Amino acid sequence: MIQDNGITDSNEKSFEELLDESMESRLSEPENGEIAKGRVIRVDSDAVFIDLGFKFECIVPINQFLNKDGEYEVSVGSEIEVLVERPNPNTVRASKQKADQIREKRAIEEKFKNKEPVSTRILNRVKGGFNCDIGRNAPFKVFLPGSQVGLRPVADFDEMVGQTIETRIIQNNDNGIVVSRRVILEEEREEKKKETLATISEGQTVSGNVVKIIDAGAFVDIGGIEGFVPIGELSWGRVRHPGDVLKEGEDIQVKILRLEIENGKITLGVKQTTEDPWESIQQRYKVGDRVRGKVVFAAEFGVFVELEPGIEGLVHVSELSWVKNFRHPNEVVSVGSDIEIAVLGVKPRERRISLSLKQIQENPWDEFKRSNPPNTRVSGTIRNVTELGVFVEVAPDMVGLVRPENLKWEGEVSPLEVFSGEDVGKEIELVVLNVIPRQRKIGLGIKQLTPDPWNKVLRDYKVNATVVTSKIEEVLETGVTVGLADNVRGFYAIREFQDEEFSRESIKVGDEISGLVTGFNKPKHQVNLSRRRLEKKQEKDTMKDFASSQQESSSKLGDILNEKLKALD
């Protein structure tokens, strides 16, 4: 028999207190999917032990504590947030990595909602763009399309890898997260553009920076907005290439020539900042005048002659000789020589003076044209065979050209496949196609000796209907040619292939490809083909078949349900 003497041990808790603590512990246990705070109580080489309180401990792999620099960030006593996973009431697991991802995602959603910029590290290049990381404390991969990297196309994608840039999230849905640097740059440019447009006007001289040089001229940033300096507006004199006058990144003075705000075009000039030496040119040179000058440069298209300091005229190749055949103008005149020429035209606004060396002589080409109208059959002697065509002398010192497309009706072929060096000197029969005396050109044809078989091609191949599979015969810079039936050639333009795909290593002669007939190039006797149009057609046909099958399935299901309902009645 136990007697109650009224004395209670202060170090012992009553049953009610222990029960309350147990219930409180039960109520405070971390639940599945909850992010809980804990304290690190032990760090091993491969794991970290965390006390979550309420007699709950968990183990987290130490590799989850690697920061973005590849270093471990953990120490005994530090507080850590983890995601609690409880597959059953007696098992508690934790993941710091998942907790970090949840926090990162919440932060990213907030930035997406507020359109805030995010620091973005470009990890590696993938098809169409880059894989990037926008996580602050933990990796969070997103996609940056190549078109969203900058305001202009990126010349070398590989140079972007490893860079950290500011971007904005433009897509955040089940399909993934997409970021853009371009939208930020466009907004910055738009702000500068507004400020600049409010202060500039036509005729004004402003400061600018050369941002890009192309063959046609140079783009210059004049304050958030770009203007274009055509090559003809760079200098009063002759400019072979804009790069000879300007350098990218160079600060220059330009004059606003045309301001088309509605079209977003600004035309600039550099030469207008200096005096124009061509203003009085017509007073000194008139059409028909015979003048003397010095040959300063010989190009394939003609000879430049300096008439006076700063003033140059052009003798086009067609104005060098009536009949003399030459590969380069320097076979007719020499740089540095003094020659007499005739003035054909003066255009001060275009800074052009047209000159002629042959106009002081009579023209024998006019007589040939009168005697040999188009479709006249003539005979001639083969003088040369090149990839450009067959050169045939049809009169003394007058050579005409049979171009590759005028050799055979079956399609353009290499002249070297039809004729060889042994044929030089051989006499052949031809048809005169055209004569252009001013250009010293006689167009000749061999295939025109027989009727054109092209009409059969038009019957056999239908646009947007006929699909052909054929082997590649030739890979050109402009596309791919394939062989079709009846010696007909097909052609796929370069735009039908991906940039990395269109190389001699991935597209080879002999490979089979399929395409849809999209049109005809009658002058070349060529059928135009498209892989992309074929893919679209196949997708469209598939969708139609799918839609038809769905309608049929829905109809059958409806019939079954109606039969069931009738049975219930």
Image (spheres, rainbow, N blue to C red):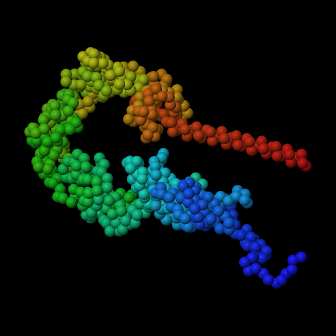
- 466 lies left or right of 158: right
Give the residue drawn at x 70%, y 56%: 87
Examine the rendering and report whether any part of residue 380 can be seen. Answer: no
Front residue of this view, candidates 104 and 245: 104
Which of the 4 quarters of the picture holds residue 18? bottom right
Percent x, y for residue 448? Answer: 37, 22
Vertical position of residue 455 compared to residue 268: above or below: above
Front residue of this view, candidates 143 and 18: 18
Give the residue drawn at x 46%, y 61%: 119
Give the residue drawn at x 70%, y 43%: 550
Q: Quadrant of the N terminus?
A: bottom right
Percent x, y for residue 306? Answer: 13, 44
Which of the 4 quarters of the picture holds residue 85? bottom right
Examine the rendering and report whether any part of residue 207 can be seen. Answer: yes
Percent x, y for residue 83? Answer: 62, 61
Q: Residue furthest bottom?
A: 6
Front residue of this view, candidates 186 and 283: 186
Front residue of this view, candidates 530 and 91: 91
